Amino acid sequence: MKRPALAALAALIVSFLSPALASGRREVRDGPGEDVGRFEQDVARRFTTADGLPSDDVRSVAVTDDGAVWAGTAAGLARRAPGAARFEALAEVGSQAVTALTADGRRVWALTAGTARAVGVNTEGEPRWRWPAPADARVVVPWARVPLPREARGVVRHENMSMIPVVVEGPPLDVHAIAVPRAGAAFAARQGLFVAEDDALVRLVPDDGRRRWDLIDVTGVAYDGRGRLWFTWPRGAGLRDGDAWRLLTGHDGLPREDATTITAVPGDPQGRVWIGTPRGAIRTDGATFEYRQGPRWLPHDEVRAIAADARGNAWFATPAGLGLIERRPMTLADKAAHFGAEIDARHRRTPLGYVDGVHLDRPGDLASFRQRDSDNDGLWTSMYGAAECFAYAATNDPAARERARAAFRALRFLSEVTQGGSHPAPPGFVARSILPTSGPDPNEHHGRARDEEKRRTKDGLWKVMDLRWPTSADGRWYWKCDTSSDELDGHFFFYAQYHDLVCETPEERAEVAAVVGGILGHLEAHGWRLVDWDGRPTRWANYSPASLNHDPDWIDERGLNSLSLLSYLAVGAHVTGDARWRRHARALVDEHGYAMNVLQGTKPHLGVGTGNQSDDEMAFMSFYDLLLYEDDPALRVIYARAFAQAWALEAPERSPLFAFLYAGVNTGATARTPWGEVDLSPRGAWLTDAVDTLRRFPLDRVDWPHRNADRADVVRFASDDPAAPPRGALRDGRALPVDERSFGHWNHDPWRLDSGGDGRSAADGAAYLLPWALGRYHGFVRE
């Protein structure tokens, strides 16, 4: 497409009415932002026999007013004193199973199996009161003032001779749970939900105007910190606020409907409760829902009982131990410091410090970590390094500058290690990764036979090589070849931020220019292909017009690889000052239609929830740089429109990285079309979603399994492949929250409902650090 036609098309498509996107503008600017103070971070722990419990089979749990935690197990009762690290078994109570616990001030009342008795235990853990209990007892009531039906099966009450028990008239009840507010009581029973009013039992039939539930088999009941009455039953949950009911199922956002127990957070002004189910627990205030399932959060999915304290901490009785989800006050900066310390402790590989995940010899045991290389050491280290660049620009922390400097040296070395040695690559070739030659030879596991098998079974264009790990000129390193386009996307994204935000002297900038110019010189010399030591292009780093525009095998890569190369050239022109890179970009646009390739889309897809998320990660980094440095208004408007199309697909994923990359360069842009003017700024809840993801981002980066396919609040995507992993979205169309799935990087599939592994790997924290620092830099996040 010739330039005049391109300019006319751009004028038709979009015009920028804001100076916010002036080419190369790099100072921190004011914009839409959210003030983020301290928040409560969920941190999970588990307690077993190793921590003093008589048995891992925990049947019941209670928290008394002094903060002591009591655990009823299959082999007796244990107490954790306030501030103590361990539980102490209370041998005086016996070794029989403790099936129910009721907190009473600083005392606890226990139901024991076998001899069927109730035991009152004082603050010293001494059993002071004992009395017989029916064999089917489920609830112990130590207070004579609680009004009970004359026949309340499953309930045992302490017969305090100094007080006359209160009895209300009504039908016999098989009681599962009792909730006691300041006056009266509520009963979850097999016969329904009942409250004691005016010396009589009243059966409640909830009706919220949409549904009317004639309840049976009510499993739990509680009064929350706002005085609202809650209940659970096998088809959901509900609450009464004054005279109004709200009934909750999967259609209302309740993750599971098969609720078995409920506990209120004491004194919580938001009225939050915990709901237990056979597969996990749910924290809710009736409007928002947080699902805690899998080993990241619980020792076992079967939640038998829950106890909560006034600080919001919750304890969970399960068949595999006692779980604790602690509410830890934290800021986003605190979380960034946590992940920085974790990276320093175990995620820097080789003296150069390549950042990536680690293997764990024992599931979940971070002390058993072993470092490993990956195909994408350059990409992940680039994204980590970019985080430090943005952090330095936003905070002026000299430590962030030093970490960015170290990342630059590591990434530059990937261009240097390929020169000379046993199989030298052409100048400017970038290695994927390195390994020390003092260790095992990786070629023993990456031979020609493996490549041929992969070409035959998975990828018909896979590159078959005799040697994937040549050695360096000094003999100290193996370096991995067949480098892909996502590696280059990462390198150029980092070099741009490092040059503009970290480099402070001409010498530092010249270092960046030399590396960037070397890589571009290699691509230029090889017809816009990355050519390996064997003289053949790598599998994925092919940006040539002949391939992208005329080879059917490259149709799917046309938009993304056109974008990548245009972005590299824009970065190169900016960093090196060499005008030939801009001339090359102009020729690709005018003679080969690369701008139109970008506008037509950067990945094949069928709408939201489809396509390759790795392509999205690569595209968003490339769009960000391209819109920073492209100085032709006609081209900038086309790229902005193309970026808006890509963002429309990604917004429901709630990724703060994608949100901040898009908003950082497209806020303030407007599209002028024949149908009117359209604002290209991100719309809707994008900022709230992004900040919420940063808040909820788990501190635990182990790849624990999450199972969401059977949730009541998700809609499964249709699939023609019955063997394909289940995929879907919440009923509002968005992806699952970040703390309800497992992932390492933002190239994961957020629509996959079942995720994670076996707990034998741990991701680094760069997936948090980059969007956090980017948000701070652009002012989207204010602390």
Image (tube, rainbow, N blue to C red):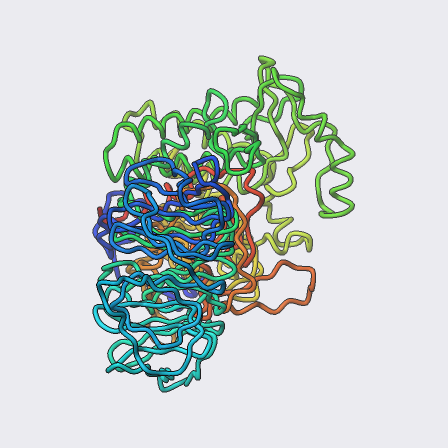
Residue 532 x/y as whole percent: 64, 31
Query: Residue at horizontal 65%, vertical 41%?
Result: 539
Counting from the top left corner in percent of width and height, residue 82 is at 28, 41
Of 515 and 202, which appears nearest the observer? 202
Residue projecting furthest to the top: 474
Q: At 58% across and 12% down in the image, what residue appears?
A: 474
Q: Is residue 244 left or right of residue 581?
A: left
Instruction: Note whether 236 is above or below 314 in the view shown.
Output: below
In this rendering, would 295 be left or right of 662? right
Nearer to the camera, 193 or 402: 193
Q: Is residue 679 above or below residue 125?
A: below
- Number of on-image labels: 0
Q: Position of residue 586 (x, y in %)?
A: 46, 48
Give me the residue at 36% from left, 83% from top. Answer: 170
**Res 196 quadrant in image:** bottom left
| Residue 585 visible within the image | no
Q: Is residue 89 left or right of residue 397?
A: right
* The one of 287 and 128 positioned closer to us in this rendering: 128
Q: Quadrant of residue 512?
A: top left
Considering only vertical position in the picture, is 323 above or below 714? above
Q: Residue at x 46, y 22 (%)?
A: 352
- Front residue of 732 and 16: 732
Where residue 314 appears, x then y in whole percent? 35, 52
Within the image, what quadrant is residue 68 found in?
Answer: top left
Residue 625 visible, this angle: yes
Q: Is residue 67 left or right of residue 61?
A: left
